[in-house]
Image (spheres, coloured by chain):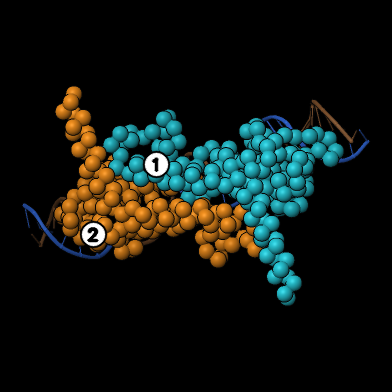
Chain colours: A cyan, B orange, C brown, D blue
Amino acid sequence: MKISTKGRYALRMMLDIAKQGEGAVISLKDISGRQDISVKYQEQIVMQLSRAGFLSSVRGPSGGYRLVRKPAEYKVGEILRAIEGSLAPVACLDGEENHCARCDYCETLAFWQGLDEVINRYVDQFTLQDLLDDCKEQEAKRESAGKSQ
Amino acid sequence: MKISTKGRYALRMMLDIAKQGEGAVISLKDISGRQDISVKYQEQIVMQLSRAGFLSSVRGPSGGYRLVRKPAEYKVGEILRAIEGSLAPVACLDGEENHCARCDYCETLAFWQGLDEVINRYVDQFTLQDLLDDCKEQEAKRESAGKSQ
DNA sequence: AAAAATTCCCAGTGGTATAATAGGGTAAAA
DNA sequence: TTTTACCCTATTATACCACTGGGAATTTTT
């Protein structure tokens, strides 16, 4: 039950851009240097994030991508679902067109629905800002640990 | 982020056996008739469930499989993990051998750990008996709905 | 003793999705 | 003129998934 690489990368990219400060325009090349993701692969991901309205772009030299909203206004769940399509643990929950023949009398459907809810509730509980705060906390810890060496 | 067919089938098979009553020995052919899963495919699944110590087998005519414990003593999570290996949403959490190079300074690891916990807590919260009770409730509803027609 | 039903076990197969890379080109802005 | 985004279309490699096949071993039934 894995999140795809694209989904993980998308989150890291969004966080990377957010980390550079409010309104900062960041090129894929820059992100590539920090995150070890090829520019070509990033293109595929960033395209989906732009179309979802999460990023706006600036062309030309010193161009790149910029967050449209403030970090606190992006739920992590939104980002993941934009890339993954859905986080549903079974296809039956993906939409009516995916309902299987057994749905009406399925003994396990309610269980899966509950899991779906728990997952979505969790990922929607955090925003980019929350992850940003975690980063700063981590850095602070590393710094104080460094001093004591 | 999908549970595999094997995982879903495993749960349905365990539930099917449980439904036939305590100590009942059920053949794959019987399960196949009710659950629409080929005997051949079930073999693979049931093998893993047996090796995990969840089922015991009886060979020969009128043979089949039997629950080792009472339904209330199987967490759904145990069953799923026995088949899926792990429910971790990212490989980094699957074990030390899967840690990526970025783990030490990963900005998103804590987020994924939290998701992993939430998922496992949910699936371990339910037992086969709980799903069994749900079934009976469903049946009762269907019956009363049938009467009113 | 023979036949049938079943579990047990290994091997294979076809399809699909994933994770990427490669390469082409156009458009816009510094 | 350069740098970047934008937008295609592949192609690859590989891994996993869902499922099938062929048999051997074991037990019950006939």
Q: Nearer the viewer, residue B73 or A98?
A: B73
Q: Which circle marks residue B33 in the picture? A: none
Q: Quadrant of residue B124?
A: bottom left
Q: Quadrant of the C terminus of chain A?
A: bottom right
Q: Nearer the viewer, residue A75 or B69?
A: A75
Q: Chain of mark 2?
A: B
Q: Chain of mark 1?
A: A
The vertical placement of A106 against B85, above or below, is: above
Q: Which residue is mark 1?
A: A113
The vertical placement of B122 against A106, above or below, is: below
Q: Position of residue A56 (x, y in %)?
A: 72, 34
Helix, strand or loop under label 1 = helix
Marks 2 and 1 sit apart, C-alpha to C-alpha, by: 25 Å
Q: Position of residue D6 (x, y in %)?
A: 73, 31
Give the residue at the far bottom of this rendering.
A149
Q: Amino acid at mark 1?
A: Gln
Helix, strand or loop under label 2 = loop
Q: Quadrant of residue B32?
A: top left
Q: Amino acid at mark 2?
A: Lys
Q: Which residue is mark 2?
A: B70
Q: Are marks 2 and 1 on the same chain?
A: no
